[in-house]
Image (spheres, rainbow, N blue to C red):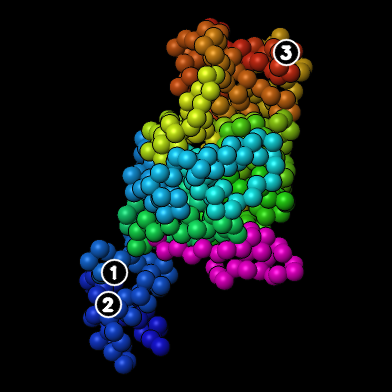
Amino acid sequence: MIDRTAVRNNANYLRNVRPIDPEEIAEYIEGTPHPAVVRETLREEAFGLRLREREDGAFVPVEESPVDPPGWAPAALPEAYAFAVEDLLVREYGANWHRGESGDEIRERVRRLKTDYLYENEVEYDRVAALGYAIYHLPAYYATVGYVLDDLTENGLLDRTLRVLDVGAGVGGPALGLHDYLPDDAVVEYHAVEPSAATAVLDRMLEETGRNFRTTVHETTAEAFLGLDEEEGPASDTDDSFDLVLFGNVLSELADPVAVADAALDALAPDGSLVAFAPADRNTAIGLRRVEREVVASGGDPGRDAEIYSPALRLWPDAVPSDPGWSFDVAADLAVPPFQRRLDEATARGETDEPGEFVNVDVQFAYSILRPDGKRRVDIEASAERCARMAESERHVTDRVNLLAVKLSHDLSEGDNALYRVGDGSQATDHYLVCTRETALNRDLREAGYGSVVFVENGLVLWNEDEGAYNVVVDDETVVDLVAP
């Protein structure tokens, strides 16, 4: 057995002198172990030593600076990942996997998955379902995770050494997106928790990650891994806390998502982040927001376990929202990956059937980031001297008021007056800003991004009986200022 302490000591000495060569270190270790053994030991110790392995096999220190926003805007699922998906399909069914009985089987399973999600049925992931899931969902989930992580990197809150827990890792979309989002000099200890047959797909996809993205797959449930299963006991084999915990479209599939999310918060480092995202459809998006609200203690309690970092900020520190909370972001569509096109084009269609049933390249997602250190994406609070609370909109109907609001949608209109969902953390009913006339003084409303904070001066509050919501009219008498992008 190699003397790990000696390896670490030598690496710590050499790190400030020159690149660390396993062959050189081997000469200073008792018994002169083979350089390959030293190299593997350095790989296993790399995270703790903040070392990354270069392509030439030498190890160098990881930069201390945090991850910079990479300008994440993927146009397509990378070719290597698309090939890996097709490789699995060809292995399972042959070159014509998308035709005949195999194509019919996959299409039937994708249809069933879509129906189960729509009606919130329990989903069973056997090998066919896992392949269907990869075909239909992996590209969009790959793109989604990077857009969500932008909220952290813009404030320098993602380190170049990361210990990551991916709860319900599925077929690997979030893992691959995280891998490509991070710079080449990052070092990651990635732990995936996945109890289903999806691990066969996940393992193949993780083969495409780099040498400094070290992966471990735990084939167990989230409840068991996090110590919530009293019969089995904790299944985690790591006592270390995590810098990032991911829940990629999994909270809606858990029997008790609040308990699991609470346990995941306990597994976070003090400055870590819990990142959850879900499809933009009403059920899963509202479900995610419901979990967020139950997990976060209410009303500025100093004993709270977590704070909402983004996007649904509570701008009134003593308030808690109780509206449905259907909010989602939208990014550019991806190019259709070859495996989706093949499956879709091979579909037998009737005269009324439209193409595209098995194409899913929309990147639309609800998300939540929670942190135990109390940090928020923007540190802004509303003032009663300047603003009205959305919780009190009923008494302001037909009045003009000032509001501090988080923009929680893109334009939801169908070409008429621009319509944006907003919140301030106090709302009990849906609120929308309706721009009936854009001017130079209110243009910031359109230009503000999702999650931005805007100050609305002189907005007209109206009650929309048909929608059961408040519409705040933004017209030529209204000023909208971008407070925080």
**Mark 2 or mark 3: which comes first in sequence?**
2
Please state if 384 lies on the left or on the right of 356 as rendered: right
The location of residue 440, given as percent across then percent down, is 44, 12
Whether the residues at callouts 2 and 1 have beta carbons within 8 Å, the answer is yes
Amino acid under disc 2: Pro
Q: Is residue 485 visible?
A: no
Q: Which quadrant: the N terminus?
A: bottom left
Asked if residue 38 is positioned above or below residue 288 in the image, the reply reads below
**Foreground pick, 348 / 152:** 348
Question: How many other residues sit within 10 Å of disc 1, few (<14), some (14-19) or many (≥20)?
Answer: many
Task: Give whichever of 36, 23 is nearer the camera.
Answer: 36
Q: Secondary structure at mark 2?
A: helix
Splitting the image into 4 quarters, where does residue 293 fall? top right
The residue sitting at 29% across, 69% down in the picture is: 59
Comes first in the chain, label 2 or label 1: 2
The picture places residue 394, in percent across and down from the top left corner, at: 76, 18
The percent position of residue 154, horizontal first and vertical second, equals 43, 42
In the displayed structure, 178 sits above or below 351; it is below
The mark that comes first in sequence, 1 or 3, is 1
Q: What residue span does the magenta drawing correspond to? A: 213-241
Q: Residue at x 37, y 71 (%)?
A: 43
Amino acid at dot 1: Phe
Q: Position of residue 415 (x, y in %)?
A: 51, 11
User: Secondary structure under badge 3?
Assistant: loop
- Label 3, on which residue? 466
